[in-house]
């Protein structure tokens, strides 16, 4: 087991080479992705995806460890039960382990009570394995939106330091396009919480999604790099990136998806490993927890945004 790394973090969001980029990975098996929610996946294929998720996540940990980079892994709670050694490795090597829900269901599928229980199960399972508190959350498919604003109250009541579920873009499955692009205080119906939104690029009067995922696979790397430079010029605006382990596994079995979903899911997967290595060598990366701790010290300076309907 590799010893924890100690990459230095920086409290200033400056425009020089020390500008901190929030690096995060959303960890779930490939058959749990939103576009496969309607599919019936057999036990053998599920086992294959679980094994490949573990192998690919270990490859990611190897890449980060070789460079002394620490990141945040938002992990589905059930994976703490099925792959405890993998989750334990994340923590032992200095990475943050955050919650990505218990079983990767969109927030739309819950009410406040059932969401609270789902969150509790996830946080308990992850904390039990890592021996560390869970302070950050990312909803599957960025499903903290206007219709699920009540989730902010639940997250705040759970004692979390921050959320990173709001994507300030227009999309057919998610997004709050009018939300701030920098760190902000998101207001629910009763409570509020620090929000670290995903990276966007402002161009042609629109917020373009450039934070990772399919956008990382589809667009040239220069587009993400431009978004990072743009974020560095704004106050309290860390560039928050996200990726999934399955995006770095080009030989995995393909799911029987519709033509559009198949394109969105598999475009560019054969070039992601080389592209990620180039990205990792170019920036100062910081776990989300440390970004949140730095920004929270200037909470009174942050913009406020009411997600709940008035």
Image (cartoon, rainbow, N blue to C red):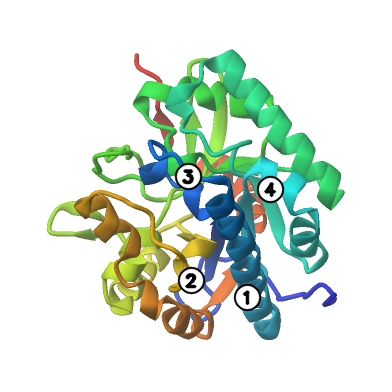
Q: Give the labeled residue for mark 2.
A: 248
Q: Is residue 28 visible?
A: no
Give the camera-side residue of 140 and 206.
140
Residues at discs 4 and 2 in contact (Cβ within 8 Å):
no
Between the C-alphas of marks 4 and 2, the distance is: 18 Å
Image position of 219 with respect to 195: above or below: below
Circle 2: element type? helix
Q: Residues within 10 Å of mark 3 (few under 14, many from 20)?
A: some
Q: Give the labeled residue for mark 4.
A: 79
Give the camera-side residue of 269 and 218.
269
Q: Can you give x and y, in whole percent of width and height, for residue 235 in the image?
A: 44, 57
Q: Give the labeled residue for mark 3.
A: 41
Residue 171 shown left or right of residue 160 in the figure? left
Which of the two labelled residues, at mark 4 and mark 2, occupies the earlier sequence position?
A: 4
Write down the quadrant of residue 154 in the picture: top right
Where, quadrant-wise, is the C terminus in this rendering? top left
Q: Give the labeled residue for mark 1.
A: 59
Image position of 69 with respect to 164: above or below: below
Write down the quadrant of residue 159 in the picture: top right
Circle 3: element type? loop
Which of the two labelled residues, at mark 2 and mark 1, occupies the earlier sequence position?
A: 1
């Amino acid at each position: 087991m590799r010893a924890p790394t100690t990459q230095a973090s920086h409290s200033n969001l400056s425009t020089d080479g020390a500008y901190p980029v929030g690096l995060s990975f959303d960890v779930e098996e490939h058959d749990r992705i939103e576009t496969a929610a309607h599919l019936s996946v057999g036990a053998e294929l599920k086992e294959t995806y679980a094994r490949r998720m573990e192998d690919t996540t270990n490859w990611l940990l190897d890449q980060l460890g070789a460079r002394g980079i620490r990141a945040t892994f938002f992990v589905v709670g059930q994976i703490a039960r099925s792959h405890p050694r993998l989750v334990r490795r994340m923590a032992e090597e200095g990475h943050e382990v955050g919650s990505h829900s218990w079983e990767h269901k969109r927030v739309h599928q819950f009410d406040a009570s059932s969401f609270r229980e789902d969150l509790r199960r996830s946080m308990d399972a992850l904390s039990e394995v890592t021996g560390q508190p869970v302070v950050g959350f990312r909803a599957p498919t960025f499903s903290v939106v206007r219709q699920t604003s009540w989730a902010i109250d639940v997250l705040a009541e759970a004692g979390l330091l921050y959320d990173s579920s709001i994507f300030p873009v227009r999309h057919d499955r998610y997004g709050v396009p009018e939300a701030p692009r920098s760190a902000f205080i998101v207001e629910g119906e009763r409570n509020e919480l620090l929000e670290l939104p995903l990276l966007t690029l402002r161009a042609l009067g629109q917020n373009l999604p450039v934070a990772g995922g399919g956008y990382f696979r589809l667009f040239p790397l220069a587009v993400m790099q431009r978004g990072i430079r743009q974020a560095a010029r704004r106050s309290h605006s860390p560039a928050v990136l996200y990726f999934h382990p399955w995006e770095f596994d080009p030989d995995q079995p393909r799911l029987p998806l519709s033509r559009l979903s198949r394109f969105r899911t598999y475009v560019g997967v054969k070039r992601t490993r080389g592209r990620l290595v180039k990205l990792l060598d170019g920036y100062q990366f910081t776990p989300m927890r440390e970004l949140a701790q730095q920004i929270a010290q200037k909470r009174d300076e942050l913009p406020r945004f009411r997600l709940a309907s008035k």
